[in-house]
């Protein structure tokens, strides 16, 4: 795309009232040049964008009584479709909040605000604006770095505001202006007021509650317009201004002219823009009220495709857009200049100002093939800028000056700024860690031009979800920075990291990283095994478990059912441990009891154990509490015999089937049957017992008498 910029025409309309009873008003308008003139941008397809500003006057007083539909826009006498934007209402309100950086580098800017605020307010009030001022400061010490002055309210008078600013002193702190823009957009604005935030800073912003991406939706939703007084190479400042349709002013420009320009942008001004395909050559632009008096229309000339075209080299554009490293010298400014209508270029000048703000104009050297260059041999230190514009004049006297309120900052100058770039933080490792083991963290960091050895790097760390950060310095070796996090932080929750790198120019880079714990196996070494029993409980269950930490979400449970019913889960209690150390390498004993059950019930149980990284369960074990259909018994239930008597038969019944017999003194015909023959052998009391398959027993007493004579 080629661009040509024309000075000359801006439109101002003189509105003369002509009200009579019963008749419509009669308007007379004429065009008056209004800085900076008609701007023409030639497009590659042959079309041209024509745009500019004009003011409407009623008896020489500014007015905005007409709406866009009340104007006719023509090119070469032919009506064209154009966009006219109406200015704010007269006697409008402007609520202005200053977001002011008062860090150590801003002392001169604080003084400029003190000195020129009154003139800024006077300029607006002279055009029927009711102005209120608010103030939020950031970058001060001690904390909090960001403060809403006057308790977050607008000042009663501009003098109260000036008195507050007069008490400010530059200090030092983080530039949390993302939060400042959000808070400014939430001030108690009046309904219908222009909502304006003046961001005054020389830094690209430090995130706290907000960053640039989270702050701007809030600011835009609250309809706050941001005017930046800063540097154009601060990308976040440029983003804040562009997203709110504000304007950016260079912080090194005279402060009174910046505030005056901002005031002018607020005061009533119409804008007009149109896209035309009339082609190269001279043309005429008319912007008049529809009800214009015959003969009252004036027309102003503009040309398309005739002025010299100036194109910066890619290297020069890169220096403007990306800046240069501090200490860079010399700077070689290159541009090609052509005359599209076949004329010759007579002269190419560069107008520039060095860091000392000395305005200078020099003729650029010709390099042949329409190329021109100029070498600036000064040295740019941190935040210094080389500002310049280029003017080309052809053989017909037409001239083009670029940038005409284009470029990378307003005001008709490009700027090449030197900066100590923010450190670049690369890969941070590791991504995982071992439970309750020290964690060695590494970060690749580079800094141009000073090198990584000049950086101050801090590692911030905390368990995931915790509020308080720990921090430690990181040591450097060949651009790799390392630090070791203590094992007490290395729990199951995970670890959050922030690596913070600060260079010698106080540029700060921050990068977040998160780590997850490696899997800690959990195993159940042994579990108590109960067998069928005559006991009804309670039944103690012991479990030996390894790889568990009950302080960090670990859990051991006993799960049991009775007769296949609904499972019951009981937490087990840790009872014995070797030491209160990492349980990933130790075993621990846990205990719980199954409550008393009824006879004849079947109990099944297992133990489950888990930590935040793993879980397991034991084999299921089952047992019964025994209850036979009929009690085990012996018939007869007692006997009296004498030594030498014949054997007496005893019979077992009930219990659980297979029986086993035994006696203290006598002889038994069998020990495994439901009946046996007992023969006494020794006088006295003898016992005969039987035991069934499940262990139930029955006993009878035999009174054995001595042998009869």
Image (cartoon, helix red, strand yellow):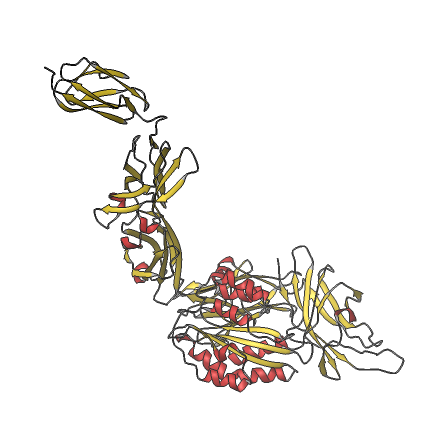
**For residue 244, which quarter of the picture?**
bottom right
Looking at the image, residue 156 sits to the left or right of residue 483; the answer is: right
Say which quadrant the N terminus sits in: bottom right
* Residue drawn at x 80%, y 78% as measured from the top left: 28
The percent coordinates of residue 551 (x first, y second) are 32, 51
Q: Is residue 448 above or below residue 660?
A: below
**For residue 683, which quarter of the picture?**
top left
Q: Is residue 160 above or below residue 381?
A: below
Q: Taking the image as drawn, is residue 155 in sight?
A: yes
The percent coordinates of residue 123 (x first, y second) are 60, 83
Looking at the image, residue 614 sits to the left or right of residue 269; the answer is: left
The percent coordinates of residue 491 (x first, y second) are 32, 51
The percent coordinates of residue 251 (x first, y second) are 49, 74
Q: Which of the pair 489/95 is nearer the observer?
A: 489
Q: Which of the pair 419/204 is nearer the observer?
A: 204
* Residue drawn at x 31%, y 30% as measured from the top left: 532
**For residue 259, which quarter of the picture?**
bottom right
């Amino acid at each position: 795309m080629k661009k040509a910029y024309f000075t000359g025409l801006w439109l101002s309309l003189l509105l003369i009232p002509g009200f009579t009873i019963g008749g419509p008003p009669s308007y007379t308008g004429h065009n008056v040049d209004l800085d900076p003139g008609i701007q023409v941008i030639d497009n590659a397809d042959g079309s041209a964008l024509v745009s500019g500003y004009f003011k409407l006057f009623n008896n020489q007083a500014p007015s905005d009584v007409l709406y866009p539909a009340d104007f006719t826009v023509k090119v070469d006498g032919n009506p064209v479709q154009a966009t006219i934007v109406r200015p704010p209402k007269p006697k409008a309100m402007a609520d202005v909040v200053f977001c002011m950086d008062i860090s150590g580098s801003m002392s001169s800017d604080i003084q400029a605000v003190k000195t020129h605020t009154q003139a800024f307010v006077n300029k607006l009030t002279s055009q029927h604006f009711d102005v209120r001022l608010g103030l939020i400061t950031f970058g001060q010490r001690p904390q909090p770095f960001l403060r809403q002055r006057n308790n977050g309210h607008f000042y009663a008078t501009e003098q109260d505001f000036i008195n507050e600013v007069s008490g400010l002193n530059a200090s030092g702190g983080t530039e949390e202006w993302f939060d400042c823009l959000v808070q400014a957009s939430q001030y108690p604005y009046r309904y219908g007021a222009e909502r304006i935030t003046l961001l005054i800073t020389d830094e690209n912003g430090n995130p706290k509650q907000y960053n640039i991406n989270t702050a701007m939706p809030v600011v835009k939703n609250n309809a706050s317009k941001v005017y930046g007084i800063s540097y154009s190479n601060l990308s976040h400042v440029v983003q804040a201004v562009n997203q709110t349709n504000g304007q950016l002013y260079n912080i090194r420009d005279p402060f009174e002219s910046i505030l005056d320009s901002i005031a002018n942008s607020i005061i009533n001004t119409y804008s007009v823009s149109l896209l035309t395909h009339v082609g190269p050559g001279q043309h005429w632009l008319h912007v008049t009220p529809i009800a214009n008096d015959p003969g009252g229309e004036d027309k102003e000339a503009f040309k398309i495709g005739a002025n010299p075209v100036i194109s910066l080299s890619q290297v020069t554009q890169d220096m403007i857009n990306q800046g240069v490293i501090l200490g860079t010298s010399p700077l070689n400014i290159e541009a090609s200049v052509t005359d599209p209508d076949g004329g010759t270029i007579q002269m190419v000048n560069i107008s520039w100002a060095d860091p000392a703000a000395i305005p200078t104009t020099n003729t650029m050297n010709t390099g042949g093939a329409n190329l021109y260059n100029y070498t600036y041999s000064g040295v740019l230190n941190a935040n210094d800028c080389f500002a310049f514009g280029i003017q080309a004049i052809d053989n017909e006297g037409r001239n083009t000056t670029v940038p005409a309120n284009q470029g990378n900052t307003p005001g008709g100058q490009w700027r090449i700024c030197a900066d100590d770039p923010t450190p670049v933080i690369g890969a941070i490792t590791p991504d995982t860690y071992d439970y309750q083991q020290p964690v060695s963290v590494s970060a690749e960091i580079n800094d141009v031009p000073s090198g990584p050895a000049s950086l101050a790097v801090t590692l911030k760390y905390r368990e995931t979800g915790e509020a308080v950060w720990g921090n430690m310095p990181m040591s450097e070796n060949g651009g790799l920075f390392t630090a070791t996090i203590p094992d007490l932080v290395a729990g199951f929750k995970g670890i959050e990291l922030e690596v913070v790198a600060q260079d010698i120019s106080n540029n700060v880079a921050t990068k977040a990283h998160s780590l997850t714990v490696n899997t800690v196996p959990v195993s159940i070494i042994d579990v108590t095994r109960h067998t069928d029993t005559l006991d009804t409980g309670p039944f103690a269950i012991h479990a030996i478990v390894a790889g568990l930490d009950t302080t960090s979400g670990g859990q051991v449970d006993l799960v049991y059912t009775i007769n296949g019913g609904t499972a019951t889960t009981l937490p087990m209690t840790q009872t014995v441990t070797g030491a209160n150390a990492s349980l990933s390498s130790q075993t621990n004993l846990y205990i719980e009891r199954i409550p008393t059950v009824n006879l004849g019930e079947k109990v099944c149980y297992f133990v489950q154990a888990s930590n935040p990284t793993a879980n397991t369960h034991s084999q299921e074990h089952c047992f019964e509490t025994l209850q036979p259909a009929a009690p085990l018994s012996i018939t007869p239930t007692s006997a009296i015999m004498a030594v030498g008597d014949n054997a007496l038969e005893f019979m077992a019944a009930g219990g659980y089937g297979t029986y086993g017999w035994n006696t203290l003194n006598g002889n038994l015909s069998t020990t495994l049957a439901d009946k046996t023959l007992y023969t006494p052998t020794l006088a006295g009391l003898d016992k005969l017992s039987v035991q069934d398959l499940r262990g139930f027993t029955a006993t009878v007493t035999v009174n054995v008498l001595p042998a009869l004579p």
